[in-house]
Each structure stands twice: as C-alpha cells, then as structure tokens.
Amino acid sequence: MDWWANALLIAGGYLLGSAPLIHLLATHRGVDLRRVGSGNVGGSNLWQNLGPGVGAVGALADILKGVIPVVIGRGLGFDLNASAAAGVAAVAGQIWPLFLRFDGGRGNSAGLGMAIVASPVAFALSLVPAALGSAWKGLPALLARRGTATPERWRFRAQSRSVPLGLLGTFALMPLLSWLRDDPPGVTWALLAVLALIVARRLTAGLCDHRPRGLAALWHRLLFDRQLP
C-alpha cells in the first residue's frame, strides 16, 4: 500500500475513535457526563449514572472503536502493522476526540478492542491483572451476600482503585507478551503505543483543576487513575 493509503486508514481510525457515542447516549437521556460523577466521558461514568444496560451498550461501542479499524484495514488488504496503527489512532481519538474539544475517555475500551484483533493471544493472556482487579473490587459485595465481613487484612483502600490498577497491569503486559510471541514488530510497537497513550491520559487528566499536585498525585493518577483523596 502507498503511504497515503496508510495515512488515510490511520486518519479514519482517529475519526472513528473521536465519535462521541457515549456522550450522545448520555445526552439523549438528558445527562451531561462532564458534569456528573467523575466528569469523564467514558463507559464507567455512563454505567454509574445511567445504569448497567446503557453502560454495557456504551462500553461495547467504545470497544468496537478499537476493533473496526484493524478489521477494515485487514479486509482492504493493508498489512497488520498499518492496521494496528489505525487501531492506535482510534485509541487516541477516544482519549482526545476531535468532536469533544480533545477531552474524552481514558482509552481503556478502545485499547482492549484493538488488542483483541491485533494480537488475540497476547490479549487473552494479559487479562489476568484486569480480572484480578475486578474480582478484588467485587469481593466485599460477595462476602456481604454470604453474611461474612471482609477481613481487615484483605481490604484495599477504596476497592474501586483495584480496577484501574489491574487494567494498567494488563496494558503493560500486552506488548511484552506480543514480543515474546514474535508478533510482527509493528503490532508490538502498537501495543506499546497504546500503553503510552493510556499512561499519558492518566497523568494529564485533571491538570486544569485545582487539585493536589506533586509526585504523590502523579503516582496516584498513574496507578489508580484517580486524584489523591
């Protein structure tokens, strides 16, 4: 393929990622996600404010943002490297969408979608940290249903932080596993680029707000995708 064809595919990936589907789902129901909950135009904030049904639709839409550019690229005869790059562009679009003044979601859903089709084995193996983080979050509720209190030594301050920590572990494992499996170099670099984009978004989110600064705040944002309490 000529360089301009690759550029068009990548630009199309970014525009698809920029499509404000979650924002439109929320505003159609009279909710501006930028003014409620975490203020993030993402699937978790949609879920928390409009329920699991709408939240699941929004999460699926964002996952497909990462899937579609890779699938279309391969279907049109582009090599896997160029198709994976288009998937990375979709992640960038979800994080910094053209249609929402470059302030979007966290990129997790689109990043997972891109990895599903670009390197399925690396994706599946790397899900362990994300699964553990989700299980840890749900542990207190599970124990409560059984009438058992959560042991103090098992408690992780603010269990919700275990999910972003697990996701960070998953995205960090993906390029390593891709490299160990001898995936095409462009795929490994694409997964590394997804990790870099997600880390950049975490570290820069909320910088315009009057919130805690310094190394501790940056470290907290990196690991837990949250500001300091």
Image (cartoon, grey):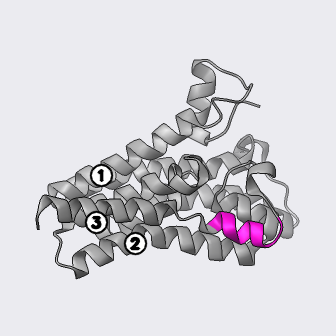
The residue singled out by tag 3 in the image is 9
N-terminal of the pair, mark 1 or mark 3, is 3
- Mark 1 vs mark 3, foreground winner is 3
Cα–Cα gap, marks 2 and 1? 17 Å
Tell me if I can see residue 125 in this picture: no
Q: Is residue 26 magenta?
A: yes
SS under mark 2 = helix
Residue neighbourhood size for the residue with mark 1, other residues' Cα within 10 Å, grouped as few (<14), some (14–19), many (≥20): many
Which residue is depicted at the point 39% across and 42% down?
Answer: 196
Number of the label disc, if any, that sits on residue 175: 1
> What's under tag 2, amino acid-wise?
Val
Give the residue type that dot 1 points to: Pro
Per the rendered image, the range of residues in magenta is 22-30
Residue 152 visible: yes
Q: Are marks 2 and 3 in contact (CB under 8 Å)?
A: no
The residue pinned by badge 2 equals: 67
- Between the C-alphas of marks 2 and 3, the distance is 13 Å
